[in-house]
Image (cartoon, grey):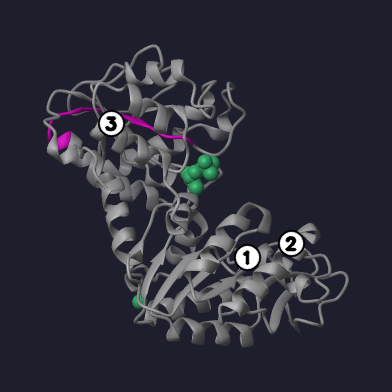
Amino acid sequence: MSFLRMDELDIGGKRVMIREDFNVPLEAGRVTSDARLRAALPTINMALNRGAAVILLSHLGRPNEGEYSDEFSLAPVAEHLSGLLNRPVKLKKDWLNGVDVEAGEVVLCENVRFNNGEKGNDETLARSMASLCDIFVMDAFGTAHRAQASTEGVIRYAPVACAGPLLSRELYELESALTNPERPMLAIVGGSKVSTKLTVLESLMSKVDELIVGGGIANTFIAASGHDVGQSLYEPDLIHEAQRLIRMAHKKGGEIPIPKDVVVAKSFTKDAEAYVRGVDEVQQDEMILDIGPLTAIDYATMIQGAGTVIWNGPVGVFEFKNFAAGTRAIADAIEISNAFSIAGGGDTLAAIDQFNIADGVSYISTGGGAFLEYVEGKILPAVAALEARFNA
Ligand code: 3PG
Ligand code: MG
């Protein structure tokens, strides 16, 4: 991959605008997992140490475009980041009209998704962002799969556009891990819906030897195997697709295993009472919130036998203590495994933090969707734009 890199440039005294992925989980106005903020620190510190005036951009969540809302404000991020950088981080609300920032200072611009035209990659918007800087640094690997004004668009119009150290490192690590991976290769994909991950599951099937599905996705596969899932979150319309993927796996000599046992509850609440059931014993008024202990052993064994493990998404509602055991078993198995392990995605990073296994994971990506799209072999639009500028 060839593109300009921030560390090759003389950035002293320049207005350096860095696109970050500060899309972090918040609870009651506080950042609950700061992995993405910590991952951005080396780039920001490098820019400051070299005397740049630093302007940071990020999105947060999916607000209604064109409307400010407190709920999606980056204020908690500015505050948390200020603590991590040990210096003030000013939050600028109406920044498209201009940003005052001196060398050695950091200004965080309010959520890019409050601007009309961000998602549609509007040219006028991208040009006004570009006009605020001398150098644009794309460092948001987690958002590199989005062709939006603050990612792909601004790269085309900025006076100079380059990749930041985090983006470069993510691409380098993933490419090294996925070129001639150690086999068998196992992917663990959790999440609530098959519909949002159907193409991912399908292309992963052609790359990996085994695929473990978790969460709501697994419920659809359980239903596709003929079991009643009671009140569980699942997608009846996608049962045929799930069956097709199971057949695809078998044809390749691999499998998408169905849990033997599950943990259920009668309500989706933090302190709901948990019951272990065989997968064919789920009652009408119960919902599946985790894999059961026998399944956890099976999955841990698969992880121990793998040469490469790709992990995106928990297998249960690990935020609730009664439904955390399955995800903990996966995390522990990855921690002790000798497989090359790559993990990515917001929930996955939160689980890695919660179970304190970061040291046992070979590479932790800040990307969720971007990470999966990269693994699938898709071109990330922001990376393509950097390459196009480099080759122009
Ligand atoms: C993510 O968390 O995956 C990225 O920040 C992208 O967010 P998005 O899916 O809302 O574009
Ligand atoms: Mg390990």
Q: What residue type is labelled 1?
A: Val
Q: In this view, does 5 lie above or below 183?
A: above
Q: What residue type is labelled 3?
A: Arg
Q: Does the residue labelled 3 lie within 8 Å of ligand 1?
A: no
What are the residue bounds of the magenta stretch? 48-59
Q: In which quarter of the image is residue 82?
A: top left
Left or right of 221 on screen, residue 386: left
Please identify the residue farthest to the front as the structure is shown. 251
- Report the disc number at residue 389: 3
Q: Which residue is drawn at 57% across and 73% down?
A: 212
Verify whether residue 348 appears in magenta: no
Q: How crowded is mark 3: few (under 14 residues within 10 Å), some or many (20 or more)?
A: some
Q: What element carries label 1?
A: loop
- Report the disc number at residue 106: none
Q: Which residue in the structure is indicated by mark 1?
A: 317
Q: Which residue is drawn at 45% across and 80% down?
A: 333
Q: Which of marks 2 and 3 is in front?
A: 3
Check contact, mark 1 vs mark 2: CB within 8 A. Answer: yes
Where does the image place residue 61, in percent across and percent down from the top left? 54, 39
Where does the image place residue 265, in percent across and percent down from the top left? 76, 71
Check contact, mark 3 vs mark 1: CB within 8 A. Answer: no
Q: How many marks are shown on the rendered structure?
A: 3
- Report the disc number at residue 268: 2
Q: Is mark 2 on a helix, strand or loop?
A: loop
Q: Which residue is drawn at 50% across and 87% down?
A: 301
Verify whether residue 58 appears in magenta: yes
Q: Residue at x 58, y 27 (%)?
A: 69
Q: How crowded is mark 1: few (under 14 residues within 10 Å), some or many (20 or more)?
A: many
Left or right of 377 on screen, residue 235: right
Mark 2 or mark 3: which comes first in sequence? 2
